[in-house]
Image (cartoon, grey):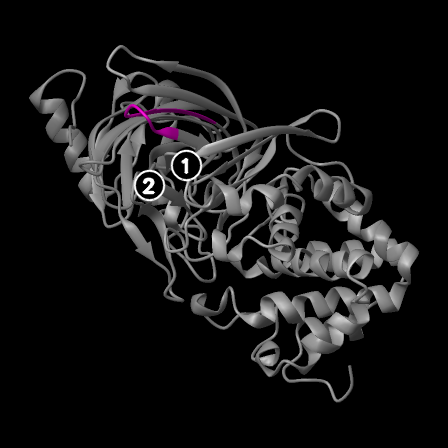
């Protein structure tokens, strides 16, 4: 790590003393800044995310060598200060920071666990846009979640897969890694000859160097929470198609599972068409899927515009579920991890609707099955007791039951208005549980407090479905 100053040893000593003491400094025009918060006090991950600024764009330049596991990275972060800033934090797990600048000038750097602190040469005024550049390298970590699942940087037989829900994106790039701070992305990724790098959004260019290394550039024009960013590196078979008359669809599969997954991958446009009829316009400029071997990743994930699946989870209900997340979770993102049920309830209910339309199973039948599952009653869906419970059965199954009770209470016409209206109102934004309950009541034109008390917040199982 480097910490350089503008005028020499005396300025360096002063800067380091201020950093250690956490003192404020004077910015241009006499503005006095204070350090941004080192966490956003999320109910489950209080140190996740950072205060004092809002990221607008990430430009990540990465090179990965599977033979050594080494990742070389440069993160250019464009952000706006929300207070007078003397210093600010970025979330970063492992990896070695080689250099950092703010607006082109060297910044002092310190590390404490997953907190990377940058102190710019001069304070940043509230409302000002600034650009931080961090150069880093090392072998990225695999992160074990509170529930025992693995995320972050997952090594595969021929490359790697980066997935980030809820905290793993900090394993491969520094940032404000809380779902409340969404940003647009550009990824430029260089990999050895014979490998491909697949990410979110649209691939805008690809080139091959004289040594065979290939560099691809991916652009995500719509805001994305960092946990939805993905990078898949390996020997992929890819297919292209068009959905909804204009949306490019790119699917990628490990060669070992390409043939087995081909037929279902080809159905992405068809499923998206059905979903737009129920959920409203598709919210992104690209779509697709990435299918890995079983064992490379232990679960399916709704990574934005291009969900990730192990072959064993790549079936029609799961594909419907993860594509539904593009509206519910990806475009409308939870304001905190406590609001995760808003993602999973809608995605689960989309499975019920699909089974109702194409499988001859009414949503009422799916509701009754979920009601009979005792695991679904372990806690209220809007109040998981710990981080270990964020992806428990109540969040999915009881969350979907909440939506079905809303459907019963307001009728189909109003319910389907809510299905499309909710992602339209909060398109490319974040929302809370309270935002949702207020929205439903405004559309329904009635108080639904009793429904929320029993099905969303209530302890225990009601006597009747």
Q: Residue at x 61, y 80 (%)?
A: 377
Question: Of helix, strand and loop, which one carries label 1?
Answer: strand
Q: In the picture shown, does residue 50 fall above or below 106?
A: below
Question: Of helix, strand and loop, which one carries label 2?
Answer: strand
Decide if residue 171 is on the left or right side of residue 147. Answer: left
For the N terminus, give its image quadrant. top left
- In the rendered image, residue 434, in percent from the top left (x then y), is placed at 68, 58
Is there CB contact under 8 Å for labels 1 and 2? Answer: yes
Q: Is residue 403 magenta?
A: no
- In the rendered image, residue 364, in percent from the top left (x then y), is placed at 81, 71
Q: Which residues are magenta?
A: 186-196
Looking at the image, can residue 122 be seen?
Answer: yes
Q: Dot 1: within a 10 Å radius of its alpha carbon, few (fewer than 14), some, or many (20 or more) residues? A: some
Name which of mark 1 and mark 2 comes first in the sequence: 2
Q: Residue furthest top?
A: 210
User: Which residue carries the number 2 mark?
Assistant: 160
Q: Residue furthest left?
A: 9
Q: Is residue 188 magenta?
A: yes
Frontmost residue, 365 versus 415 = 365
User: Which residue carries the number 1 mark?
Assistant: 231
Q: Residue at x 32, y 54 (%)?
A: 143
User: CA–CA distance between discs 1 and 2?
Assistant: 8 Å
Q: Dot 2: within a 10 Å radius of its alpha carbon, few (fewer than 14), some, or many (20 or more) residues? A: many
| Label total for image | 2
Q: Residue furthest bottom?
A: 463
- In the rendered image, residue 422, in percent from the top left (x then y), is placed at 75, 48
């Amino acid at each position: 790590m480097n910490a350089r100053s503008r005028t020499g040893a005396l300025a360096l000593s002063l800067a380091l003393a201020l950093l250690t003491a956490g003192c404020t400094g004077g910015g241009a025009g006499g503005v006095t800044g204070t350090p941004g918060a080192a966490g956003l006090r999320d109910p489950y991950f209080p140190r996740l995310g950072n205060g004092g600024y809002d990221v607008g764009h990430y430009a990540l330049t990465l090179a990965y060598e599977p033979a050594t596991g080494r990742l070389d990275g440069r993160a250019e972060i464009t952000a706006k200060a929300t207070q007078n800033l003397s210093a600010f934090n970025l979330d970063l797990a492992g990896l070695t920071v080689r250099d950092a600048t703010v607006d082109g000038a060297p910044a002092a750097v310190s590390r404490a666990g997953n907190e990377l602190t940058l102190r710019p040469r001069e304070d940043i005024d509230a409302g000002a846009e600034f650009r931080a550049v961090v150069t880093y390298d090392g072998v990225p970590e695999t992160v074990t979640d509170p529930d025992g699942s693995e995320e972050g940087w997952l090594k595969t037989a021929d490359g790697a897969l980066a997935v980030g829900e809820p905290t793993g994106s900090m394993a491969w790039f520094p940032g404000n890694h809380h779902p409340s701070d969404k940003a647009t992305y550009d990824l430029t990724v260089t990999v050895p000859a014979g490998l491909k790098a697949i990410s979110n959004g649209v691939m805008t260019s690809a080139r091959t160097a004289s040594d065979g290394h290939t560099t691809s550039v991916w652009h995500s024009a719509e805001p994305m929470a960092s946990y939805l960013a993905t990078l898949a590196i390996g020997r992929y078979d890819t297919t292209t198609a068009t959905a909804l008359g204009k949306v490019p669809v790119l699917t990628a599969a490990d060669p070992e599972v390409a043939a087995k997954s081909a037929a279902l991958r080809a159905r992405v446009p068809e499923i998206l068409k059905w979903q737009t009829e129920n959920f409203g316009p598709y919210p992104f400029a690209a779509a697709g899927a990435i299918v890995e071997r079983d064992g490379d990743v232990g679960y399916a994930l709704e990574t934005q515009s291009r969900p990730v699946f192990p072959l064993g989870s790549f079936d029609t209900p799961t594909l419907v579920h993860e594509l539904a997340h593009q509206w519910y979770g990806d475009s409308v993102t939870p304001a905190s991890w406590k609001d995760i049920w808003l993602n999973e309830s809608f995605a689960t209910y989309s499975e019920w609707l699909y089974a109702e339309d194409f499988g001859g199973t009414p949503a009422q039948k799916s509701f009754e099955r979920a009601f009979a599952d005792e695991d679904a009653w372990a806690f209220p869906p809007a109040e998981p007791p710990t981080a270990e419970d964020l992806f428990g059965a109540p969040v999915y199954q009881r969350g979907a039951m909440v939506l079905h009770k809303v459907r019963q209470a307001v009728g189909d016409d109003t319910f389907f208005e809510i299905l499309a209206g909710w992602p339209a109102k909060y398109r490319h934004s974040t929302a809370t549980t309270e935002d949702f309950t207020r929205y439903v009541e405004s559309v329904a034109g009635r108080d639904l407090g009793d429904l929320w008390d029993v099905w969303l917040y209530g302890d225990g199982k009601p006597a009747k479905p």
